[in-house]
Amino acid sequence: MTAERTMSTLNPFYSTGTYTSGPYTVHIGFTSRSAGNLGLHVNAGESHTATLKNRADVQSLCGSAPFLYLNQVHGADIVCADHILSTQISPNDERGAYTLKRADQLREQAPQADAAYSTTGQPLAIMVADCIPLVFVGEKPTPHDVPIIAVAHAGRPGLLAGVIQRTVATMREQGATQIHAWLGPSICGSCYEVPEDMREHATQQIPETYAQTSQGTPALDLPAGAIALLNKLKIEVSTDLAACTYESTSLFSHRGFMNRGEAPGRIAGLVWVTKPS
């Protein structure tokens, strides 16, 4: 397993990693601002056709099939990507064009869920701008089987709703063993200020989320909560690819947009599989 952080303003990835499973290499990547906005639901000061091109450029760089993006709703539902046609997720239409019509089609066709998995190596994407993007890889009992991969979006509501537990349970139902999880960039406990009653509600369910800001005001540490849940599930966790979205100028942050007037946008956590030819 290897990991790398890329701080270059020209590199569309903030951090990347790989994981070897039998003859397969699983690639994990978390994009930066340099990749552009990847969320079709975001009014990012650029047209939705530009967002489609951003997605296509990232896909081309990865050398993968189109990534499955979701309509995320801060819940805990998980969808199987294996039977979704590539024509439903390709960022361009049959003419190779990036059009507003194509953007509308993708938004309508994208599954409404906050996690996805694949047993066949279908490339997966999850979008965030302060919430936690998680990537999972699970070994299969037979070494030459394609590893099971998954992604999840864990903001405060999703974390409390059990999106992590549901993703892990689904992977295990599909036969995954030795599951590994990577946390990507998200807002840290020192920056995620919340009302006292919100902190109390969250910490009653997940005590490890308790935090306070550098000014001593109530806060939540979502990464600490996610790590605690994963440890209880006996999942190997890596934070090598993580960072604070609010502190880093290389990452989109919803709070940065709301509090400091930064450009809105979404980064993506990506996972795809390759096999030597």
Image: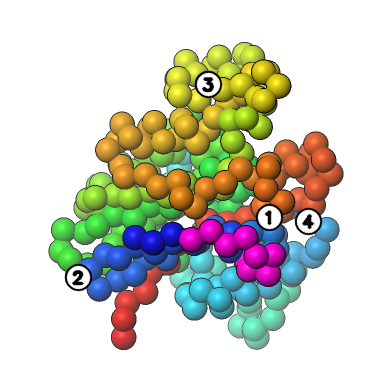
Tell me the distance, in whole angstroms, between the alpha carbons under discs 1 and 4.
16 Å
Q: Earlier in the sequence, mark 1 or mark 3?
A: 3
- Write the residue at 30% across / 42% down: 235
Q: Earlier in the sequence, mark 3 or mark 2?
A: 2
In the picture of the structure, the residue carrying the numbered disc 3 is 210
Q: Which residues, given as a range, are shown in magenta?
A: 4-12
* Side (left or right) of 43 relative to 191: right
Tell me the distance, in whole angstroms, between the alpha carbons under discs 3 and 2.
43 Å
| Within-10-Å neighbours for mark 2: few <14, some 14–19, many 20+ | few
Instruction: For marks 3 and 4, give the one nearer the viewer.
Output: 3
- Write the residue at 37% across / 74% down: 274
Q: Earlier in the sequence, mark 2 or mark 4?
A: 4
Q: Is label 2 in contact with label 4 (beta carbons under 8 Å)?
A: no
Residue 121's label in the rendered image is none
Q: Secondary structure at mark 2?
A: loop
Q: Earlier in the sequence, mark 1 or mark 4?
A: 4
Residue type marked 2:
His
Residue 250's label in the rendered image is 1
Quarter in which the N terminus is drawn: bottom left
Q: Secondary structure at mark 3?
A: strand
Q: Secondary structure at mark 4?
A: loop
Residue type marked 3:
Tyr
Residue 44's label in the rendered image is 4
Tell me the distance, in whole angstroms, between the alpha carbons under discs 2 and 4.
43 Å
Above or below residue 142? Residue 239 is: above
Q: Position of residue 179 (x, y in %)?
A: 29, 49
Above or below residue 61? Residue 103 is: above
Instruction: For marks 1 and 4, give the one nearer the viewer.
Output: 1
Q: Is label 1 in contact with label 3 (beta carbons under 8 Å)?
A: no
